[in-house]
Each structure stands twice: as C-alpha cells, then as structure tokens.
Image (cartoon, grey):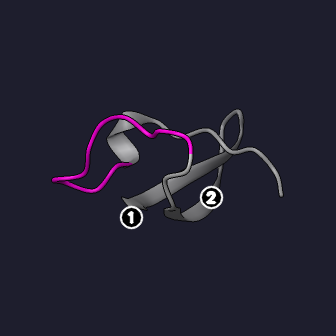
C-alpha cells in the first residue's frame, strides 16, 4: 500500500467532505504534478 494525495475536488458530488479512519475509499490513482493523486473518489 502506498499513500496518495486526496484533494476535496476529487470527491464525487454528494460525498461527505471528511474521510474518517475506517471508511472504505474507492478511487482511481493518477499521476499528479506532486506524485500519486486520487481521482473519482467514492466513500462507502
């Protein structure tokens, strides 16, 4: 597992704006300007 940056703009519409410990996160990993970044983020 590797860390990726998640920007609030990557969250899908209607998703909460806070990611708490234990929340399952689904995303597409893309290469951003500063390294791995999450896109199309869904919380479940």
Q: Residues within 10 Å of mark 2 (few under 14, many from 20)?
A: some
- What's the residue at 26%, 43% (across, down)? 16
Q: Mark 1 or 2, which is nearer the eye?
A: 1
Q: Secondary structure at mark 2?
A: strand
Q: Secondary structure at mark 1?
A: loop
Where in the figure is residue 9, as x and y percent of width and height?
A: 34, 40
Q: Which mark is residue 20?
A: none
Query: Over which residues does the magenta segment extend?
Result: 11-21
Residue 22 on the magenta segment: no
Where in the figure is residue 5, as x and y percent of width and height?
A: 62, 38
Residue 19 on the magenta segment: yes
To which residue does mark 1 refer? 44
To which residue does mark 2 refer? 30
Q: Quadrant of the N terminus?
A: bottom right
Q: Is residue 3 left or right of residue 22?
A: right
Q: Residues within 10 Å of mark 1 (few under 14, many from 20)?
A: few
- What's the residue at 42%, 58% (across, down)? 41
Q: Nearer the viewer, residue 29 or 18?
A: 18
Q: Is residue 2 left or right of residue 29?
A: right
Q: Earlier in the sequence, mark 1 or mark 2?
A: 2
Give the image quarter of residue 12. bottom left
Overall secondary structure of the magenta section: loop
Tag 1–tag 2 contact (CB < 8 Å): no
Whole-number angstrom distance, CA of label 1 to CA of label 2: 21 Å
- What's the residue at 82%, 51% (across, down)? 2
Where in the figure is residue 20, as x and y percent of width and height?
A: 47, 38
């Amino acid at each position: 597992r590797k860390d990726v940056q998640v920007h609030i703009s990557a969250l899908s519409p209607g998703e909460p704006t806070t990611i708490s410990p234990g929340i399952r996160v689904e995303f597409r990993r893309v290469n951003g300007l500063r390294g791995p970044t999450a896109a199309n983020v869904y919380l479940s």
